[in-house]
Image (spheres, rainbow, N blue to C red):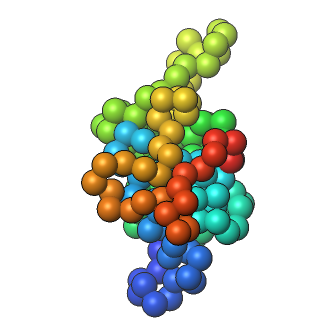
Amino acid sequence: MARMATDPAELPDYAERVLEVTELIPPGRVMTYGDIAEWLGEGGPRQVGRVMALYGGAVPWWRVVRADGVLLPGEELRALEEYRAEGTPLREAAGPSSRSPGHIPRVDLRRARWDGHTAGSGHPGGPGGAGAPAGGGG
């Protein structure tokens, strides 16, 4: 994945918050870049993606996905290995290409998406405990 800061003091505050949310995502579940931005109440999908590209190597980066469930380009096989180990729901695309050798499935967002609430997470949700992403984010 990406490089990471060697000292937490080097992380910008926003990056630190993004990485903290990423660490809350349970194994086998995912959030989209937009979900994380919405959950934090700041930034957007591109800003979250930039943080993950620069600093995401020290957290479970494979649990943060695009809104269409497509695996991170260039890291598909590593992510797929993690998804299978964690039991993350995946889906095959329809059509002949899904049966071709080397085809990579997508994350099944309908089943794998985490809303920011889980028993024992110790975190009530977004700012002020307001909660989870509404659903659309990307």
Residue at the location (40% across, 67% down)? 58
Residue at the location (44% across, 68% down)? 20
Indicate the position of residue 77 as horizontal and vertical percent values: 46, 39
114 displayed left or right of 99:
left
16 displayed left or right of 44:
left
**Camera-nearest residue between 129 and 25:** 129
Residue 52 visible at all:
no
Residue at the location (49% across, 63% down)? 129
**Number of numbered tags placed on the structure image:** 0
Quadrant assignment, res 40: bottom right
Which residue ends up furthest to the top in the rendered image? 96
**Camera-nearest residue between 35 and 8:** 35
Which residue ends up furthest to the bottom in the rendered image? 9
Indicate the position of residue 74 as horizontal and vertical percent values: 58, 47
Residue 20 visible at all:
yes
28 displayed left or right of 95:
left
Which residue ends up furthest to the left in the rendered image? 120
Indicate the position of residue 109 as horizontal and vertical percent values: 55, 33
Residue at the location (55% across, 60% down)? 130
Quadrant assignment, res 110: top right
Indicate the position of residue 115 as horizontal and vertical percent values: 50, 46
